[in-house]
Image (tube, grey):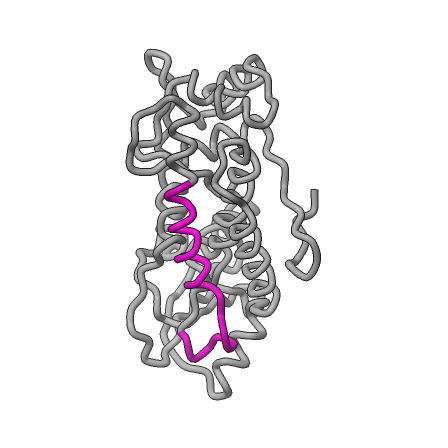
């Protein structure tokens, strides 16, 4: 289902059994839950217990999960995704001095897997591609660069000679992101905190978190007026506390630090 761009009615991506499981575990701290709890989440979407258990078996075989004594937990390779998910809710930034980080691909020849790995790493680092092999963004984020970047790229710092706000607008669809964020804000406001709304709340929560992952997290001078990024984060944080309490109650689990729908 197409989620639209925020200019019309907000349509939301349906969640498969695999998405329900991963969304729940990626949003739980620590990321481990008994099978019965994951089955209960599936029930919210009319997903049969057998379908959820089949998904769990396949996910263990694929290396997404490990199972021990009836409890399913994320494997090491998905913990990095959880960390990125958490960071998208509270990005670590530093004061911006006008410089940009620029990563230029050095090898003349790269395999398809090398290219794909670098592209994924750049998305995580929130760099945008100016042209083939040249990635950049304002140097206002605090995060480590993975080995795939340092192995394939030379990283420089510099500043554009022209208007940096115009460059940012060319690299990212800021207007489109803002429209979608405002539509999601409206969806949060429209959902009352009733247990019967849990499935819809879960789906909206996942959509918000997917959208936050796509926020370029630019310095304020480069953003359009009334940028909704921080406002959406703050609104979601308050909304999520209520949602998490309702979901924990539905699952029959004691209160804990963090169960929410991740942006699968």
Establish if 67 lies above or below 169.
Answer: above
Where residue 196 appears, x then y in whole percent? 54, 31
Give the extent of the magenta segment: 220-242
* Depth check, front residue: 151 or 138: 138
Q: Which residue is rendered at x = 54% and y = 20% of the image? A: 55
Where residue 230 appears, x then y in whole percent? 41, 63
Q: Which residue is rendered at x = 38% and y = 50% of the image? A: 238
Q: Assign the magenta stretch its main secondary structure.
A: helix
Residue 236 falls inside the magenta stretch: yes
Q: Which residue is rendered at x = 46% and y = 57% of the image? A: 122
* Depth check, front residue: 144 or 31: 31
Where residue 117 appears, x then y in whole percent? 48, 48
Residue 132: image quadrant is bottom right
* Depth check, front residue: 1 or 110: 1
Image-based side of 78 in relation to 173, left or right: left
Please count the marks in the image: 0
* Depth check, front residue: 198 or 40: 198
- Quarter of the image with the N terminus is top right
Residue 188 falls inside the magenta stretch: no
Image-based side of 12 in relation to 243, left or right: right
Q: Which residue is rendered at x = 44% and y = 32% of the image? A: 24
Where residue 29 appears, x then y in whole percent? 31, 35
């Amino acid at each position: 289902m197409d989620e639209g761009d925020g200019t019309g009615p907000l349509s939301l991506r349906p969640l498969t059994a695999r998405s329900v499981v991963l969304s729940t575990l990626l949003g739980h701290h620590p990321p481990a839950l008994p099978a019965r709890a994951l089955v209960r989440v599936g029930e919210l979407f009319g997903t049969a217990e057998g379908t959820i258990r089949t998904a769990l078996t396949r996910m263990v075989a694929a290396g997404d999960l490990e199972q021990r004594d009836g409890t399913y937990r994320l494997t090491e390779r998905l913990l990095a995704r959880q960390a990125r998910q958490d960071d998208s809710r509270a990005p670590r930034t530093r004061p911006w001095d006008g410089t940009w980080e620029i990563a230029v691909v050095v090898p003349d020849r790269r395999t398809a897997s090398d290219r794909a790995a670098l592209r994924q790493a750049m998305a995580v680092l929130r760099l945008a591609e100016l042209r083939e092999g040249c990635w950049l963004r304002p140097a206002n984020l605090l995060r480590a660069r993975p080995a795939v970047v340092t192995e394939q790229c030379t990283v420089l710092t510099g500043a554009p000679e022209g208007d940096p706000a115009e460059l940012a607008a060319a690299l990212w669809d800021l207007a489109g992101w803002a429209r979608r964020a405002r539509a999601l804000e409206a969806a949060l406001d429209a959902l009352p905190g009733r247990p019967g709304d849990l499935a819809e709340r879960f789906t909206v929560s996942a959509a918000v978190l997917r959208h936050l992952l796509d926020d370029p997290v630019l310095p304020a001078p480069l953003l359009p007026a009334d940028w909704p990024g921080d406002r959406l984060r703050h609104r979601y944080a308050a909304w999520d506390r209520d949602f998490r309490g309702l979901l924990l109650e539905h699952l029959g689990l004691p209160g804990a630090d963090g169960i929410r729908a991740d942006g699968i």
